[in-house]
Amino acid sequence: MTAADRVQALAKEVETLIPPYFILGTLLVLIAVIFTFTKLPKIQNSSTKSASQSIFMH
């Protein structure tokens, strides 16, 4: 295998890796945008215990 053939083979392998990572990156960005514009409810503490009390104390 000559150097030119090796470079061509490596370039072909790299081209096969681009689409899956592009799709994965696009999905992650889409999820981030969805979470950015979604109004999430506020978490309210309905417990009347103070912060110094532990659930493990009897």
Image: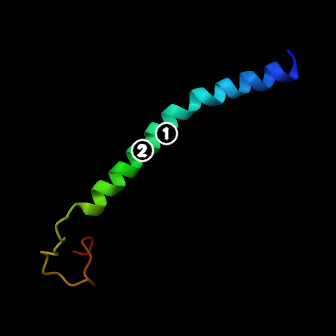
Q: Position of residue 29 (x, y in %)?
A: 40, 51
Q: Is residue 41 above or below residue 20?
A: below
Q: Amino acid at mark 2?
A: Thr
Q: Position of residue 1 (x, y in %)?
A: 85, 15
**Furthest residue to the top?**
1
Q: In the shown orientation, is residue 17 left or right of residue 38?
A: right
Q: CA distance from mark 2 to mark 1?
A: 6 Å
| Vertical side of 27 occupied by 17: above or below | above
On residue 22, which mark appears?
A: 1
As displayed, is residue 57 above or below residue 52? above
Which quadrant would the C terminus be assigned to in this image?
bottom left
- Residue located 21% across and 84% down the image: 50
Question: Disc 2 designates what residue?
Answer: 26
Q: Which element is circle 1 on? A: helix
Q: Is residue 20 left or right of residue 27?
A: right
What element does badge 2 sit on? helix
| Residue at position x 78%, y 26% in the image | 7
Which color mode does the image show?
rainbow
Mark 1 is surrounded, within 10 Å at the Cα level, by few (under 14), some (14 to 19) or many (20 or more) other residues, namely: few
Q: Quadrant of residue 35?
A: bottom left
Q: Position of residue 8 (x, y in %)?
A: 74, 23
